[in-house]
Image (cartoon, rainbow, N blue to C red):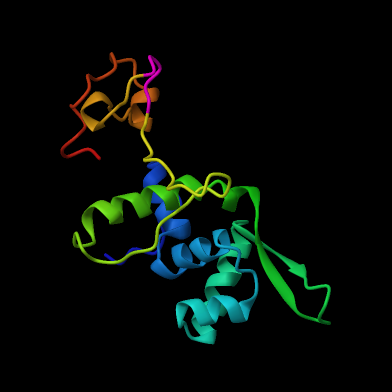
Amino acid sequence: MKRTSLGRVECPVARALDEIGDWWSLLIIRDAFDGMRRFSEFQKSLGISKGILTARLKHLVAIDVLQTAPISDEGGYQEYVLTKKGRDLFLVTVSLRQWAEDHCFGKTERRSTLMETASGKRVPRLALQGRDGKELDSSMTFVRKAADLDDSRAPRKAGVLRTAER
């Protein structure tokens, strides 16, 4: 069966991937966080064809991750600016970056580094904290399926949903 859309699936991860899950979209978003705004800047940075870039930018505007704005110094041209929805993807891009730093590069391989503007120092590692302030990992969480919200059964215990139900 050919998949056409995950937009109606009850899983938030699936819906996010449906909207921004292709690599070009994520790289455009990354470049927008790096300050790129013009079509030519994205094309030069990514080495992407005009047709693919046009389609991805159009999609990101349609789902309100980017918005267009006229460029004041040039007639008729527009730039692409992150919306609030787009800016909310910052933690996603930082998390992907940190995961890749840990798992996709050799120890001596060069890579870009995300730095704090104010201090000039490397951005600290992201960590998920529980309500008690302690760091969480996947063994300390579980997913409550949407169907369970309508079900009168007692909530499932942590770890039960880790295998087949995710």
Q: Relative to the observer, which residue lies in front, 146 or 90? A: 90
Q: Which image quarter: residue 123? A: top left
On the rendered image, what quadrant is the C terminus found in? top left
Relative placement, left or right, of 82 versus 122 is right
Q: Residue at x 46, y 82 (%)?
A: 48
Is 131 included in the stretch rendered in magenta?
A: yes
Is 11 included in the stretch rendered in magenta?
A: no
Q: Relative to the observer, which residue lies in front, 153 or 12? A: 12
Q: Residue at x 22, y 38 (%)?
A: 165
Residue 35 locus on image (x, y percent):
60, 63
Magenta residues, start to end: 129-133
On the rendered image, what quadrant is the N terminus found in? bottom left
Majority secondary structure in the magenta region: loop
Q: Residue at x 76, y 79 (%)?
A: 77
Residue 100 locus on image (x, y percent):
29, 56
Q: Which image quarter: residue 159? A: top left
Residue 53 locus on image (x, y percent):
53, 78
Does residue 5 sit above or below 163 in this rendering?
below
Q: Residue at x 32, y 25 (%)?
A: 135
Does residue 161 sit above or below 55 in this rendering?
above
